[in-house]
Every structure is written in C-alpha cells, then in structure tokens.
Image: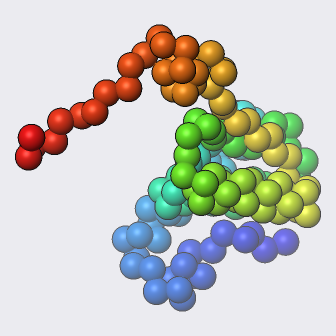
Amino acid sequence: MTALFSTDKLLDAKFSSETVEKIAAAYRAVRDLIEKDVPLAVAVSFGKDSTAMLTIALLAHHDAVRENPLRHPLTVQTADTGIENPVIHQHVQSQISLLERYARRHAIPLRIRVGRPTLASSWMTAVIGMRKVPVRLRDSSD
C-alpha cells in the first residue's frame, strides 16, 4: 500500500522545499521510533503547533499500522483546566471526537488522556474556600 505521508503532496500543496524537508525529518523520526517499538505520546492543546505534531505522529502511525499491527497505541495527552473559554473548550472536545473517529475508522490504536485539576485545587474553590484572594494586577497606567 502507498503511504499516506508524501513529500510530493506537500510540494504540490505549495509548501516550500525547506518546510517539506523539516516535516519529512519529523515524520521519519516518529516512524523510526514506531519501528523500534517505542511507546509514543503527543501532548496537544489543539493549537496550530501541537496539531501539526499530532498530525505527523498520526500519519506515521497510520502508515505503520497499514504495514504491521502495532504493539503500542499512540497516546494523546491534553489538559482541561476547567476555566477555558467555552469556545476553546468546545474546539478541543470536537478535535478529540474527530481524532477518536479517525483512529477507529483506520484501526489505529489510540489512547486519549485528559488531565484535569482536582476540585480542591481549582481556582474557584480556592477563592470561595478563602485559601486565595483574587487580586487585581496593576497595569502600567496605574
């Protein structure tokens, strides 16, 4: 089977040759680790940088699983602070859902871990419980 990752596709999409070389080097590094049976984890915020790395790792896993069954799942780690902007929170939830569907559809072993603070360590509990006092930061015009 033909690999999903292709430098020709990137060049056709008008990526510079320098950028294609960097992406290809990252892809090869991930594939080498997969071939050495190293468990991999990608920490993501689902911003542009971490999503780019996740995409490279996902493509490498997709191509690898098409050749042989994988022993280790790709672990995706993210954090839910509980105080995110609702739009950002929804974006992250949507991306996790899309990622899970993609992995299922292509038989890519995937493990998603979402870190959350304990209720006792949340900012709101600390303020209401009077362990912390909300302060106003002074700006330069004060």
User: Tag count in the figure?
Assistant: 0
Q: Residue at x 55, y 27 (%)?
A: 124
Is residue 6 depicted above or below 131 in this figure? below
Is residue 81 depicted above or below 141 in this figure? above
Display colour scheme: rainbow
**In this view of the protein, which residue sits in the foreground, 97 or 52?**
97
Quick check: 20 left or right of 91? left
Residue 27 locus on image (x, y percent): 58, 57
Quick check: 140 left or right of 109? left
Viewer can see residue 141:
yes
Residue 36 locus on image (x, y percent): 70, 37
Residue 87 locus on image (x, y percent): 59, 60
Viewer can see residue 67:
no
Quick check: 27 left or right of 18? right
**In this view of the protein, which residue sits in the foreground, 65 or 56?**
56
Quarter holding the C terminus is: top left
Q: Residue at x 8, y 46 (%)?
A: 141
Q: Residue at x 47, y 11 (%)?
A: 131
Q: Residue at x 90, y 47 (%)?
A: 69
Residue 14 locus on image (x, y percent): 46, 86
Quick check: 133 left or right of 44? left
**In this view of the protein, which residue sits in the foreground, 42 or 124?**
124
Quarter holding the N terminus is: bottom right
**In this view of the protein, which residue sits in the foreground, 56 or 90?**
90
Q: Residue furthest top?
A: 131
Residue 117, image quadrant: top right
